[in-house]
Image (cartoon, rainbow, N blue to C red):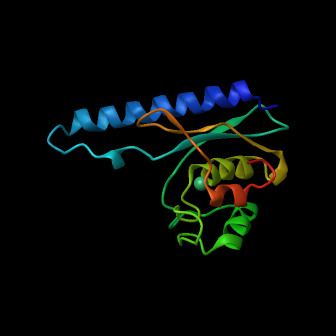
């Protein structure tokens, strides 16, 4: 089963991967001005309590992304995916949390929403911990 330790390991690897990716991108294009948005804003790991597999997810635009049914239904209960709603600054479906959870759901379709388990979320640019936003708390109320 996914453990705090395995989720921590997964998110730490994802942070390192993202920092490596941006470093290579910038080295390959030294003429291009560095931007904060070179980095994914947030990364998180998610697991299924009945499996030892863990999956990292990055914040990204949800436009054109096809969420699995359970995640999509939860997101659409907040607002149309890709929109914002009062009470949260983040776009519905753009956070790292639903992206990571979606990988779990697509790998383990029998996973229930209360069987998801998240690591802490981090900003890979600064390696600072980020609090879960209201959209995510309302999408995953069983576990966040
Ligand atoms: Zn969020």
Question: Which is more toward the observer, 139 or 54?
Answer: 139
Question: Which is more toward the observer, 39 or 69?
Answer: 39
Q: Position of residue 106 (x, y in %)?
A: 71, 52
Tell me where residue 94 sits by quadrant.
bottom right
From this view, report whether residue 32 is shown above or below residue 141: above
Question: Which residue corresponds to the image point at 83% horizontal and 46% vertical from the top-left?
Answer: 115
Question: Which residue corresponds to the image point at 64% horizontal and 61% vertical from the top-left?
Answer: 135
Q: Position of residue 95 (x, y in %)?
A: 56, 54
Question: Which residue corresponds to the image point at 45% horizontal and 47% vertical from the top-left?
Answer: 41
Instruction: Look at the image and tell me whether residue 39 can be seen.
Output: yes
Question: Which is more toward the observer, 70 or 108?
Answer: 70
Q: Position of residue 118 (x, y in %)?
A: 70, 41
Question: Which residue corresponds to the image point at 51% horizontal and 45% vertical from the top-left?
Answer: 42
Instruction: Look at the image and tell me whether residue 111 can be seen.
Output: no
Which quarter of the figure is the N terminus placed in?
top right
From this view, report whether residue 97 is shown above or below residue 126: below
Tell me where residue 119 sits by quadrant.
top right
Q: Is residue 60 left or right of residue 88?
A: left
């Amino acid at each position: 089963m996914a453990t705090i330790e395995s989720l921590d390991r997964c998110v730490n690897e994802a942070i390192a991967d993202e920092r490596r990716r941006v470093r290579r991108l910038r080295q390959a294009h030294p003429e291009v001005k560095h931007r904060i948005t070179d980095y994914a804003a947030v990364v998180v790991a998610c697991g299924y309590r009945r499996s030892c597999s863990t999956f990292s997810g990055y914040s990204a635009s949800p436009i054109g992304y096809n969420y699995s049914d359970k995640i999509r239904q939860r997101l659409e209960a907040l607002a149309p995916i890709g929109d914002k709603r009062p009470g949260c600054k983040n776009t519905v479906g753009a956070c790292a949390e639903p992206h990571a959870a979606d990988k779990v759901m697509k790998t383990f379709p029998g996973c229930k929403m209360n069987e998801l388990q998240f690591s802490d979320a981090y900003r890979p640019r600064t390696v600072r911990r980020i609090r879960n936003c209201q959209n995510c708390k309302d999408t995953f109320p069983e576990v966040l």
